[in-house]
Amino acid sequence: MSNAPTIRDAVQARLAKRHRAEQRFQFYGLAAISAAVLFLAVLLGSLIIQSVPAFTAHKLVLDVDIRPEIADPRGDASEASLRRGSYNTLIQNSLWAQFPEAGSVSEMRELFGLYSAVNAARLLNEVVNNPDVLGETIRFTLPISDDADLYLKGLTTEEEFLPGAAPLSLAPAADGGVILRSRTGAPVFDGFLDLVQARLDAALAQARRRAEQTAAQAAEELDTDTRNSLEAEAQRARDLVRALEMARSDTAPVQLNSQTASLMLRAQGGVLRISQLQQDGRSAQGDWLIGPDHASDSAETWSLWVIETPSIARRITDRQIVWARTLKERGLIRNGLNTTLFTNADSREPELAGVAGALAGSILTMIVTMLLAVPIGVGAAIYLEEFAPKNRLTDFIEVNINNLAAVPSIVFGLLGLAVFINLFGMPRSAPLVGGMVLALMTLPTVIISARAALKAVPPSIREAALGVGASRTQAVFHHVLPLAMPGILTGSIIGLAQALGETAPLLMIGMVAFIADPPTLGLSGFTEPATVMPVQIYIWSSSAERAFEARTAAAILALLTLLVSFNAVAIYLRRRFERRW
Amino acid sequence: MSMSLDFPVDNPPTRYHPLTTQLPIKVATDAVSVRYGDKLALEDVSLEIPDRAVTACIGPSGCGKSTFLRCLNRMNDTIDTARVSGSIRIDSEEVNGRDVDPVVLRARVGMVFQKPNPFPKSIYENVAYGPRIHGLAETKAELDHIVETSLIKAGLWAEVADRLHHPGTSLSGGQQQRLVIARAIAVNPEVILMDEPCSALDPIATARIEELIDELRENYSLIIVTHSMAQAARVSQMTAFFHLGKLVEYGPTEEIFTNPLDQRTQDYITGRFG
């Protein structure tokens, strides 16, 4: 027993080190999990925040007078006649009735830019389905343009509403505008004047800097093409400087233009746009965008409405902003749940674009993939695991199945293009072909996971079944397969979920496409052109319209929801099957 | 070849003890050898097993006694590399014959394994599975009857009668093993093979199974592989001692244990090796 203390000492000496190693390892694990959770939270959080604007939409509710001479040119109320009617004119008339002062062609174009003419087709369908409304006034709801929608959601510009300080007098100007003066002589526009001039100074300084920099770069540049483009840029900057210098003055009136913030003045029930501010801050000049409800030469109460973003930096004009806000105040524009997002297929107009088409395409494609990959994959796994003799051929097959699982997915797309479309002459862009290609891609995953699940069933179950005289097939289908089912289901659903998020193979067979009509959810839908959710997300993410930004995030959330529900079904099924045993 | 003991080279080859009981022969094997790939697992085993008696196979681990048992209902067929040669006859019918379907054979020769392996289904379903796949019952009542009698024969009825539809896996180890025996006798076999049926059980459960084996002896031919010499002495009428893939000695249990003819048998049963 003399060496017992030394053994204990040796253990003791190492013990601290062992404990430290264990703690260190636990810390690494904890850190890894925290990092993963943090990344996930950031991803989901930013997606949800970004997608919020896409879930509501402003709708224009118009009372449309279905005038027979426009809606029904032949006058017989037949479908052929109705289809020749000009329904956009009906909507235009109804909207124009709200703002009769919009007189010029360009003003009308701005006004009718508040909605997309595509909506006329829906009105046509309503009338065709119910010709009795001819000659009557019906209530028609249509989504407003994405730019007006973004503005009303406050995503286009900052705004400020300031009450008027003192009564104003209004007098007609020589050029047709209105001259506004402070009746008491106290300055009323001075605060805004300072703001505009500070902005102008900042913009001027930036433009000057840019002009100098590009000119210096151009002087040093040796390549002719680059020098020319730099010189052109310098010239543009100099033009801007000149324009800003004209606007910025300490003595002359300040001109408000597309480079500056817009200033609206509401008085007498109408809206004026200020175009010029005097340096004394006591008077200004503007013109009516929405006419006053009563003509008078003075205004006791009025308010200022500052639109911070210069009109050149936004896609919605001052007029459209004023109209949109007025329509909202009149109760003709209402905010509501954006059902379009879930009922429509893709569209070039963001307010009419939805995920329904891609969702239907994804569902049809997944049905084909599931019907092919799961039975074939599970069948192959059962044969290889339970019945196949172990020889070189089955070894070769096994190695190749494992290799197939690692093949880049685009290769399956090429295979689908070469075999299914070119050789078999199947339709392009169809969920049938897409599903078949994705099934090829999913098969190795299903086979490998199903084999693993079958292998995990204890051999004693097989022996028990064989021992009471079951045939091999009976042993497999009565006892082994039910026990392996949870594992097989998990593997299959992971494979399907992977296929659901796949784009590359679909690129080759034409499913990366703009599809404006959702495929029918029936047998014929399998051969109609369709696209799928990840492709829809990709198309939207590369669209120029800002409104697609939120819709992209919303579509990603929809796809994630689909994936999570897939996995939830998998977990539910696994629990259910496990509980039975 | 490594051996745990040094045997004299001129030791007589495997001898068969003449069968001295009055019981009819149920199973007869002649020169049965089994190879797993290149490995010879069982060599030249010839013996005759009586009906309505318990025959115990004893021997050290890896001696081939389980392999021998698995030959009798062709369970070795499930192992790809296994090759069985020689002749096995049950009631003078060749087991390895080409026209013999292993499914039919396994209905005649039931098997109970080392670890209780009930199906992960209800107690009722466990017992009913065999009769169902063989079509032994025409009606639900007949099936109920078979399940009840099988459970009674296996001595489990009293314990599970009121919970036939509970999972079989919820029973204790000893009950599970009796359930497995009930499952085996539900298809009305002629021979029951038991591969170390008590090795995973406690002494009380073991005693119950041994009692059961003794009762079953009245109707069946039982062949049991065991590591426990005491168990072999308690339950069996005949004993076969295997060593290194060979049958060393076979005879009435009493004689094997009291007066073994072979030195190796003597050494084994006295606990000198194995």
Image (spheres, coloured by chain):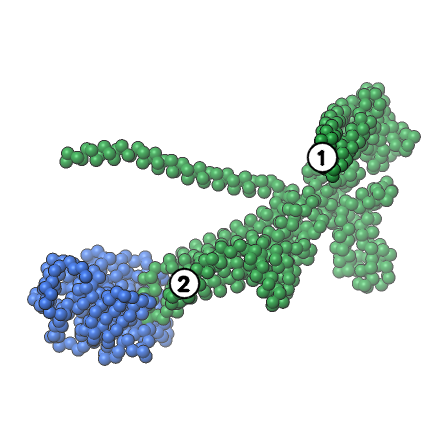
Give percent across and percent down for residue A276: 83, 28
Mark yes or no: residue A414 visible.
yes
Give percent across and percent down for residue A420: 59, 65
Find disc 1 in the rendering and name its residue: A222
Disc 1 chain ID: A
How many C-alpha atoms fall within 10 Å of the one at disc 1: few (<14), some, or many (≥20)?
Answer: few
Chain B, chosen colour in render: blue
* Left or right: A178 in relation to A447: right
* Left or right: A201 in relation to B215: right
Q: Which mark is residue B190?
A: none
Find disc 2 in the rendering and name its residue: A395
The outermost residue toward the left is B259
The outermost residue toward the front is A222
Give percent across and percent down for residue A1: 14, 36
Q: Are marks 1 and 2 in contact (CB under 8 Å)?
A: no
- For label 1, the SS is loop
* Left or right: A192 in relation to A440: right
| Rendering quarter of residue B10 | bottom left
- For label 2, the SS is helix
| Rendering quarter of residue A548 | top right
Q: Amino acid under label 1?
A: Leu
